[in-house]
Image (cartoon, rainbow, N blue to C red):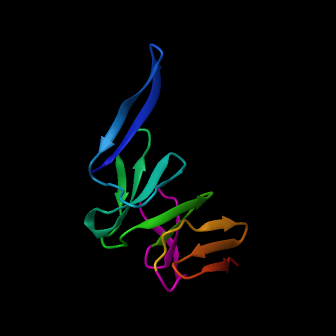
Amino acid sequence: YGVTAFRVVRRGGTWITEDVWQTKDVSLHMTNGVVVHGVFYGLSHLNSGQYFGIDLSTGAVLWTSEPRQAENAAMVSAGPIIFALEDDGELVVMRASRSGMDVVKRYDVADSATWAQPAISGDSIYVKDIAQLTLWTLR
């Protein structure tokens, strides 16, 4: 469990990794993270699903959300906005923030489980659930 930052370096003709920092306060399982302005955002499976922000330079956990958010989420960012498509079909739109989870809006965007990344193109978001592909337009 945990999140580890490592650096890939070449020593004596061999590529190796060196650990930079590690935290066991949060962890990822079946969820990816995104980086916005030096902060790594993700959904930890600890505490029954808890969003978090980690300072990439130090490994310090800057904040964690309330527990029981979701089992997992597929996350993408567009500038300072983070889209987290939770496995139950809820799309959480949040602003990147070093001080806490800043939710703009939550939308129910699918009727069945979602496992794929949402795809963003201009003002459109494509959401794939088990049964269909849906286009949502942002206004």
Q: How many labels were placed on the picture?
A: 0
x and y percentages locating residue 85 in the rendered image:
50, 71
The residue stretch that appears in magenta? 87-112
Q: Is residue 44 magenta?
A: no
Judge whether 96 appears above or below 23 on screen: below
Residue, x 35% and y 59% (percent of image)? 29
Which picture quadrant has residue 65?
bottom left
Quarter of the image with the C terminus is bottom right
Specify the farthest residue to the right: 122
Taking the image as drawn, is residue 58 in sight?
no
Left or right, 49 with reference to 81: left
Q: Is residue 107 magenta?
A: yes
x and y percentages locating residue 8 in the rendered image:
46, 30
Specify the farthest residue to the bottom: 111
Front position in the image: 56 or 111 = 111
x and y percentages locating residue 104 in the rendered image:
53, 73
